[in-house]
Image (cartoon, helix red, strand yellow):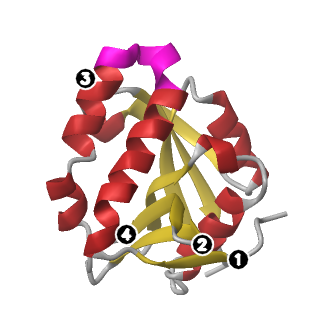
Amino acid sequence: MTPDGLIIRDALPADLPAVRGLLVETWHATYDGIYGWQRVAEITNAWHSLENLSAQLGRESGAFLVALVGEEIIATSSARLERDRAALLTRLYVLPSYQGIGVGRTLLQVTLACFPQAPVARLEVESQNEPAIAFYERMGFFLQRQARFDGREDTPNTLLMAKRLFAE
């Protein structure tokens, strides 16, 4: 059951500091036990800088959404269309205090609906992030293979998961 008054909309430049704060909080809550606080801080400072987030706004072949309750940004997602027409989910994070009540499910559904012609959705998830893996499995995703994020050796181990959106 999602919270009353949940609003999902495109992210705006003014949202970026709150989105960054949300990403830092959720990354520490999720990954400190896996990588340690310092490595998580390094990753969030690099990947979730205001400059990097700003560069993701307004992409023609993508979606960058925020979910709000009142004025508070409680979740964010982003996805882009790949060359093979697959929708690649690049981010889905919900503040820990709002997890488990349907926000992630609703945000995922809205994000994927931004790609009505995509036959499949894909994502990468950290191989030790068991709650996220279980969530994506409940949402209909299945394991394709294990890899390194972006194929680089200095990045986390990931599972590549996919979900058929419609039969071609």
The reply to whether the C-beta atoms of the residues labelled 1 and 2 are less than 8 Å apart is: yes
Q: What amino acid is at disc 3?
A: Glu
Residue position for label 4 = 80
Mark 4 or mark 3, which has the lower sequence index?
A: 4
Q: What's the magenta region? A: 30-38
Residue lying at the far right in this picture: please name it: 1
Residue at image point 30% right, 62% down? 16
Give how far apart the Cα atoms at labels 4 and 1 are.
27 Å
Nearest-to-viewer mark from 3 and 1: 1
Residue 124 image offset from top left, x and y in percent: 47, 44
- Element marked by disc 2: loop
| Label 4 CA crowd tier, 10 Å (few <14, some 14–19, many 20+) | many
Give the spatial CA distance, label 3 vs label 1: 42 Å
N-terminal label among 4 and 2: 2
- Tell me which amino acid carries mark 2: Gly
Towards the viewer: 81 or 79: 79
Whether the magenta-drawn stretch holds residue 165 is answered as no
Q: Which residue is mark 3?
A: 153
Left/right placement of residue 43 relative to residue 108 reads left
* Nearer-the-camera pick, 30 or 160: 30
Q: Marks 4 and 3, how far apart in space?
A: 24 Å
Whichever of callouts 3 and 2 sits on the residue coming sooner in the sequence is: 2
**Would residue 165 be found to the left or right of residue 76 on screen?**
right
Q: Name the mark on residue 70.
A: 2
